[in-house]
Amino acid sequence: MDARIRSELTGFIVDNYLFGDVSRTPAVDESLVEGGVVDSTGILELIEFLESQFGIEVSETETVPENLDTIARMTRFVLGKQHVLETA
C-alpha cells in the first residue's frame, strides 16, 4: 500500500511541479520546500491532491512540515489518516 501511495505522490509532483522532468525527481526524504520543488501555493495544491486522491481530510493543524515536507512524510501521513478512517 505505501509503495502505491509513494508512487502516486511522486507522479503528481513530477507532473505538476517538475513538468514531467523525471531527472529532477526528489528523493523520498528530500524536503520539497527547501529543494525548491513546491512553495506555499504548491503545498495547498498537494493538500487538495491528497484529499481527492486518497479520500482523507487534512485539517489546518496538520499542514505542518512533519506531515507534508517530503514524499516519505506524506506517505506516512496518508497511511495514518486512512488507518483512522478504516477503524472509525
Image (tube, grey):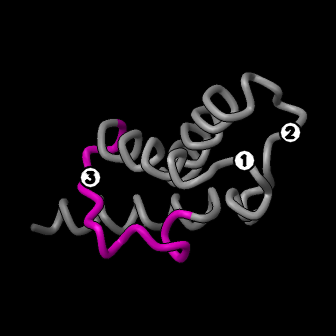
Q: Are marks 3 and 2 in contact (CB under 8 Å)?
A: no
> Callout 2, which amino acid?
Arg
Disc 3, disc 1: CB below 8 Å? no
Q: Which mark is residue 37?
A: 1
Is residue 56 highlighted in magenta?
yes
Left or right for 28, reference 11 = right
Q: Earlier in the sequence, mark 3 or mark 1?
A: 1
Number of labelled discs?
3
Q: Is residue 43 left or right of residue 17?
A: left
Q: Residue furthest top?
A: 20
- Give above or below for 85 relative to 41: below
- 9 w.r.t. 79: above or below: above
Label 1, label 2: how far apart the Cα atoms are: 9 Å
Q: Where does residue 41 sit, x and y in percent of width and height?
A: 50, 47
Q: Is residue 42 left or right of residue 70?
A: left
Marks 1/2 in contact by CB < 8 Å: the verdict is yes
SS at mark 1? loop
Q: CA distance from mark 3 to mark 2?
A: 28 Å
User: Judging from the image, what secondary structure is the residue with disc 3 in?
Assistant: loop
Q: Earlier in the sequence, mark 3 or mark 2?
A: 2
Residue at the disc numbered 2: 24
Q: Nearer the viewer, residue 38 or 11?
A: 38
Mark 1: give few (<14), some (14-19) or many (20+) Cα within 10 Å.
some
Q: Position of residue 88 (x, y in %)?
A: 9, 67
